[in-house]
Image: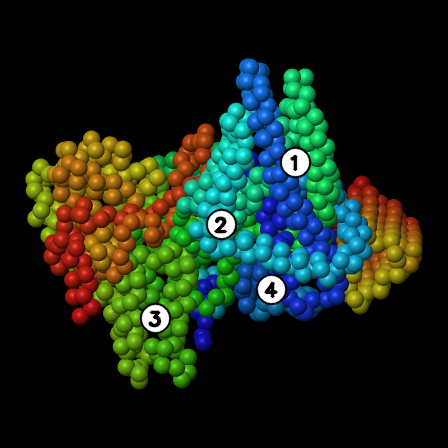
Amino acid sequence: MHKILEFQAVVLAAGRGSRLPDVGGTVSKCLLPVGPYPVLWYSLNMLERYGFQETMVVVLDEDKSNILSALEKCPLKIKYEPIVIPSNEDWGTADSLKYISSKVTTDLIVVSGDLITNVNLNEVLNLYRKHDAALATLFFNNGPEEWIELPGLKSKVKPDRDLVCIDKETERLVFLASASDFEENITIPRMLMKKYRSITMFSRLLDAHVYVMKNWVISYLVESDKYTSIKGELIPHIIKKQLSKPKNASEKKGTSVLNVDTSKDIFDFAVDQGYESKIRDMSSYNDHKLGSKGVYFNDVLRCYAHIPNKNTFGIRVNTLSSLYLSNSKILSKWEELTGTTLTERLHPNSEVKTKQIDETCTVGEKSLISEKTSIKSSFIGANCTIENKVRLTNCILMNNVTVKEGCVLQDCIVFTGATVDLNCNLQYCLIGPHHEVPASSKGNHQLFAETTDNMITLG
Amino acid sequence: MSSKGDGKTKEEVLAARQAKKQGKNKPNKKLTDDKKNTPQSSVNSPRAESLQSENVDAKNQLNPENTEENAKITPKATSSNDKLTAPPKEALKANQSRDEVDKAVKLEPELTAETSKEHIKAERAAKKAAKQAKKKNTTEGDTQNKAGNSNVEQIKTDAKAVAKPNADSKATPKNVDKTKNVDKSKDVGNANTNISEAVLAVADSPVSAATIKEMVDTLKDIVVVARDVQAVTDKVKAINIGAKKEEDSTKSKAELKAERRAKQEAQRAAKQATQQNAAEVKKESTKEPSLPKEEKSTKAKTVDKTKPKPQGMQKMNWFQHLYTEHDKEALKQMQISSNLHPAVIKLGIQLASHVVTGSNARCIALLDTLKKMVRDYSLPARTEFARGLEAQLAASEEFLWGMRPPAASQTNALKYFRHHLTQLPNNVDEFDAKKQLQEEIDRYIGEQIDKAGEAISTAVREKISNGDNILTYGCSSLIERIFSEAHAAGVQFRAVVVGTRVQRAAREMLRRLVARGVPCTYADISALSFLMRHMSKVLVGAASLLANGAVLAPVGSLQAALVARAHNVPLLVACETHKFSDNVQTDAFVYNEIGDPDDIIDKSDENSPLKDWRSNPNLTLLNLTYDVTPPSLVTAVVTEQAILPCTSAPVVLRFKLS
């Protein structure tokens, strides 16, 4: 029987990792390792856990083969269809959605490819279903970020913050803007104050980049053709439009999609398909207590935001700190995050000769770890070679890394294909892709990479 | 007397006996088992014998004693003063000693539990002795065990037999009393009667509680108590002797003869005590091998008992039958790739969260969902349209009703849809079938809800005269329509909306009426009797009209109906015929829907004592959704067909069927 899907899912994995430090060469963000698998796997696994059988994955042209080969090695049942977007044009997320619009027939869930969370997705979906919302989003209230000492150069990058206003009682999302848009004062529409008894403004919420949206939002996106970013432009626009009413409300009752005006506005898309408005009128439900307005203040568009409780784990691996943080936490939360047990910490095809490797380590396929090495809390990718008398503590080694004899690495991230020569002693260092660290070098908070401006190491 | 701790241990013994009997009934048991069983029974038999001998001894002892005391009184009538002072002491002693016996009774099982290993050793030793007397004892033990068990079973199975042990307990102390002398029997006998009364009280209390508890449990308790009674009466006899002995020794200066006899008795008592002790030791040893079994059985029982408790924490005991399996957690565990239509899932969530609530709204929402389902349905190859869709319909129905039990309007609408689905010709074209079904749905909404509402509205408008005060309870889309249309037609009246704190529906009703410009008053249900004297009519909506004419309506409606009757205010119920149900319900407890108990709590109040009610095991909140107003309180029902007495509901139902 032909199954009518309720939601289609799309995973956006074409990010370039612009918030990650420049380490020279290209690193595809969605392939950064978190624990034994690339970060993209966690998004796909989450969708799989909630019963999705297929999903679209938007990937960059240049990454496609890498991603596909990486995902093949991971345990996944979900069918993923790669959607390739050209890597030389700088497409925004909204552009990607526009690109796949022809394939979207139902309501859409947009998930970022760098999300690791144990949130119950059904809570977001039920919120969306319950109120017949145009849009439902997910924010994490993680509190202030834990301070950890990061490898690499010390930098003071301020994370971009969002200003989010939510009506606590109904979880309605009424205002969303980027904090960087404002200098000193923030202007909030007066309508908000009028409508809601109390709204809460958050500035430290982490946007999970999970958007559940109505099918018509995609049509509107295609039709209007003025948005490049979902997060930055489309979502704020829809949220803003909640406050306004359709221009000619009297005419629009019923199903008059026949407005062939040159400028179709968003309300022309948000049209009920059946008796929804009648049901709303008849049902004795109302989401607010006071005032003379009907349910939902008679709003046509309704956006909601779900904030799970504080002990929910949610992280987006888009910065160095989150990459480092997620790696340090992944194994302890493995089961609740992935719903499975991690059986093969050490890949069966790997060759681990040392006994001094503790429980919090993983080793990838075909990696060789020699005798007399000591490895603690480290993640080692595929095809790595660790020679004798090496000590690794809290390190992340990506694929094809070679660490030669006598090296001591502590709290380092070694990117793909890098080599660390004999007797190096490095702490809190980043080693760029395919870089060779000369023998006997010592470093603390340094970047070893072939970038143009970073060749001079700045202690 | 027999506290619950005692009761349990007795239950254990009982369970062990049953287990033994079962073991005996199985002839195919292993040899080792047989070996185990045989010593048990062998040791059992002496114990029982000793008990019997005890009884005999006690009786024998009592009689000579009494005679002796008779002798005391007759020669020394002058020393009656001494004796008069003595009896209270005796009584006290008797009481004390009774307590001691109680303690001993309590201690015994504890001891047995503690010293199980030692007794197992003792059992092994007993085995040797048992082997010798094997044949005899086994047969005896068997018969005795069987007899004991059969007694227990009789008591269990026959409720009448419950009286038996009581009667026995009455009889035995009385017999004891009779045998005693006049003076002593008054006082000591009082103590005895006290004991027996206490016994009776204990025996009676579970019987009186039996109305609430399940019959099986009470029967078990009674059996246990009966056994207690028997044991205690035995002990009491022994105690009396002991007490007398002591008391005699205190009075020994006065009566030398008595002292001598008392000494003799004391010796006898000592002998008996040793015998008894030996018997008890054996008794305990007999218990030991069966202990593991007991433990198992008690474990099983405790598990059974503890299981319903956590549910009882959240659920009202008397309303267990109303609770459904569905809970909030189930919503969070849903899988996305179900075969249900998305609209069905959405409706399920909306029903469960009460976003779509109210009889008419739920009906329309269901029909709207069905319409979408029909629209999107694609017929698999080589399947009849009706059959293919029916399968999906059944699954959707199950899901939706699981989310919230259906309203009468919903079941009727679904019945109507099914009817038309099955009426489709076999070779119908898919497109035509879809078109036809969707038209039927539209027609149903148009006729049964919209047009019916219009007809009712006009019918009620005629009943509203200028200057009327009309009271309504809760929120009903139909009442809202009646009021707003009557207002629009220029009738001058005031609507009085009554609601409760818990239900926000009434306030929503008020809001809507005010928005339409209807003059309104809002009052809490507590002001109902005050308001009612000024009312000219009460007009309420209904969730359903039952076949016996009773009105199923949101909880609180019955209260309004009762107050209206008390003030002789006519009660009109507005109800479209699509809400008529062929169910019959005489009260709201046989069937009802249980709402979220958290809704009762005032969440705006930070200091509400009910805030963490879940942590209080003695507190359960009950939030019933519906009320059943009996037909006697309803003046008339306004339907789209006519204004009818509510008892003519079956006529309307029959008429609708044809």
Q: Nearer the viewer, mark 2 or mark 3?
A: 2
* Circle nearer the N terminus (2, 1): 1
Residue designated by label 4 = A59
Q: Amino acid at mark 2?
A: Leu
State which mark lies toward you, 3 or 4. 3
Q: Nearer the viewer, residue A86 or A147?
A: A147
Disc 2 to disc 1, C-alpha distance: 25 Å
Q: Which label is found at residue B374? A: 3
* Of the pair A309 and A252, the residue shown nearer to us: A309
Label 3 secondary element: helix
Amino acid marked by disc 4? Val
Residue A403 location, quadrant: bottom right
- Which residue is identified by label 1? B104
Nearer mark to the viewer, of 2 and 1: 1
Q: Are marks 2 and 1 in contact (CB under 8 Å)?
A: no
Q: Is residue B191 visible?
A: no
Q: What's the CA distance linking mark 3 and mark 1?
A: 77 Å
